[in-house]
Image (cartoon, grey):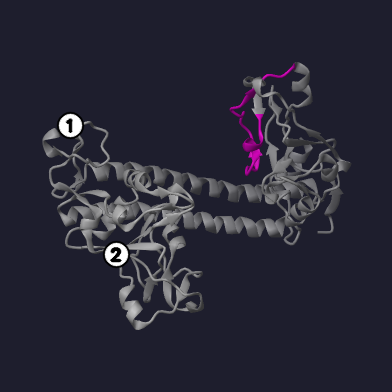
Amino acid sequence: MSEWENVALGDFGSFTNGINKDKNAFGKGVPFVNLLDIYGKESISREPAGLVQVTENEIKNYDLKKGDILFARSSVKPEGVGQTCVVLRNFDRIVYSGFIIRYRQFDQKIWYQYAKYCFDNPIVRRSVLAKSTVSANTNINQESLKTITVPLPPLPHQRKIARILNTVDSIIEKTEAAIAKYKAIKQGMMHDLFTRGIDVKTGKLRPKFEDAPELYKESELGCGSTSLTNPIPKEWEVKRLGALAKDGLKNGYFKKPEYVGWGYKLINVSDLYQPYEIDINQKDVQRVFATANDYSKYEVQVGDLFFTRSSLVLEGIAHCNIVLKLPEPSVWECHVVRLRPDKQKISPGYLGFYCTTYEARLFFMSIAKQVTMTTISQPDIAKLPVCAPTNINEQKEIAKRLRSIDRHIQNEEIAKLKYQKLKSGLMQDLLTGKKEVTPDPEDYKEMEN
């Protein structure tokens, strides 16, 4: 840490606000970097999609070069102001928005790869926020940025730190790519499984309707098919959601404020937005006292489905989730609707996935009532047409395959969280000098080039 120095940004670089143009200038011309192109991003290396008409002199004054550091000049939320994005390559003809401040070093004090991380140092962020002003938005100007002091190790040390953090970033990016791949696979699987199903004899998807129309029959409701004849497999039926419930749909337990905080675990609206399934073991789950009589009315069982019956936004209405594990007795609250599937008619797992399909979501949103809040009633939820195999084993196999892909996604998301925590810890140690690094020979060579 003894080799580190605290340096004011204004001592070794200049700040320049970006260009402001009339709305008629946009849509053609040279690439234009706007606030959204840098917000939430550590670096920029590709030309943006936006275009703007500018003069040659403006291109010269508002260009971007490798090593430039871009600051967000304004943000609706305070935590967004002064966020940085580093330019990783030279651009030929490009300009940037007036909502962005460009910082260009006179003499290299900050290695451009290191710059991606050093401005996330909590000490630096606190200084940026302290020097910002709040009106309708939170803003920071050039004069304030000039006074920001950044703790910096020697350049070879910066390069070594950047290489360590870049390695973790690379792992996180690969993990995110795997998550995106599995989610795309799941989307395709859901379409195929809920329109073609599985031949229980072969264990394979049925041929498409176009290839084997004799395996299908017409349906007034269909099952998400775009075909005009709305075909569904001959072995399938369409029933209303309410007909598949064991004892109808029920609102939950009204929790008195004085009863909250102890007693049974309580399933509430926020639990329905958990991915994959309702996790009653989560640390922040609510608890509520209920009498023996109330518990008998509102007891949760494995396989129960729950729906949100009110939401501030339309997209949140009738959001569905399922209980697959029940580690201890639980009840559900009054803002949530419970449906207990009749297991003789429908697999709870199949029904849970079906209620999250694009078609089911559209149906619920189309019949919801919007006033101050968006609401949906039990009878309306019960109207959802459900297309399902009559063979319970086929239903279970469909649910099994979708649950399997969910586990892949969940495992990758757990891994991503682990690597993000690792990166956070490394940044805390490396960017403050708490943990010393020893540069490699190539770190010194890089500085010489």
Local SS, label 2: loop
Determine if residue 371 is in view: yes
Instruction: Name which residue type carries label 1.
Output: Asp
Give residue 373's position: percent from left, percent from top. Answer: 47, 52
In the rendered image, the residue lying farthest to the front is 371
Q: Residue furthest bottom?
A: 292
Magenta-colored stretch includes residue 54: yes
Region of the chain picked out in magenta, as a range: 33-55
The residue most toward the top is 56
Q: Which mark is residue 211?
A: 1
- Judge by depth and name the residue closer to the eye, 48 or 110: 48
Along the horizontal axis of the image, is 396 left or right of 423?
left
Q: Residue at x 27, y 33 (%)?
A: 226
Q: Residue furthest left?
A: 214
Placement of 404 over or under 216, stated as above or below:
below
Q: Residue at x 39, y 42 (%)?
A: 184
Q: Is residue 424 left or right of residue 132?
A: left
**Mark whose residue sits in front, 1 or 2:** 2
Q: Position of residue 223 (x, y in %)?
A: 24, 42
Amino acid, disc 2: Gly
Between 384 and 84, the residue placed more toward the observer is 384
- Quarter of the figure that contains the C terminus: top right
Displayed quadrant of residue 249: bottom left
- Tell me the number on the disc at residue 303: 2
Label 2 Cα crowd, 10 Å radius (few <14 / some 14-19 / many 20+): many
Helix, strand or loop at disc 1? loop
Q: Residues within 10 Å of mark 1 (few under 14, many from 20)?
A: few
